[in-house]
Structure formats: C-alpha cells, structure tokens
Image: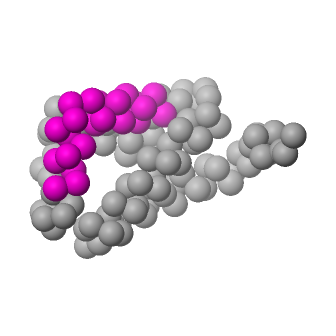
Amino acid sequence: MLGLIFLLYALNKFFYFTPVAEMRAEAVSFYSALVNTGYIMPVVAVFEILVALALFTGWYIVLGMVVLFPLSLNFVFSHLFLDPRNIIPALITLRLNVYFLFRYRGAYRALLLQR
C-alpha cells in the first residue's frame, strides 16, 4: 500500500491527474516555491518512484525506508504547520513508513552503532 501511495504521488508530480486539494495561502506559497525551483519536485518524484519499486519488488526495502522517512516527515510537518486540515494522508504515509522501519529494525542496528 505504501508503494502504491508513493507511486501515485510521484506520477502526479509529472502528469497532474489528481486535483490539488484546496490549501491555505501559506501552503500554496511553500509548494509554489518548491515547484518554481524547477528541480526539487522532479527529484522528490524520482526518489518516490524508486522507493515504490523497492516496495513492489521486495528489493532494497530497508534502504527505501531510510530514503522515504525524511520525505514522510516533511510531508507531515508541512501539513502540520501550513495546512493542517489536509494532514490525514500525510499521517497515514508516516504511519506506514514507521511500520516498515519497525518491521525491519534489525537491519538498522549497524547504522545506529557508535564507532
């Protein structure tokens, strides 16, 4: 399910097939700034597609969750501070990301060792 969510988010950044929910002015300003850079949203979309493919194939899931977690957090924080009424999809996405992080927690132990 998480792979499908991010695949749809990513493809929508290129093909605009879902309508954009009504957002507060601050959220529109933030999103517009990201889009107007010309590169941020396509780069995010590529990472989302790669993570979705990892989830669909079962390859590199652990790496995919590491890549996805900052995106999920930013998704939640941007809605929390700029557009709280549309936060539900962001919370669902973060919850699924945390589930996979927890499920594969053994694979992260080496990353968390102090050396």
Name above or below for residue 5 compared with residue 25. above
Q: Quadrant of the C terminus?
A: top right
Work out whether residue 32 or residue 79 is closer to the camera in this orientation and state it: 32
Q: Residue 111, located in which quarter of the rendered image?
A: top right
Residue drawn 45% across the image and 52% down it: 72
Residue 31 picture location, percent across and down: 21, 50
Residue drawn 16% across the image and 32% down it: 15
Give the left or right position of residue 6, taking residue 56 as reference. left
Residue drawn 40% across the image and 61% down it: 76
* In the image, residue 35 lies in the stretch drawn in magenta: yes
Residue 50 picture location, percent across and down: 45, 28
Q: Residue 79, located in which quarter of the rendered image?
A: bottom left
Is residue 67 visible to us here?
yes
* In the image, residue 61 lies in the stretch drawn in magenta: no
Residue 65 picture location, percent across and down: 57, 42
- Residue range in magenta is 29-51
Is residue 61 visible to us here?
no
Name above or below for residue 23 compared with residue 64. below
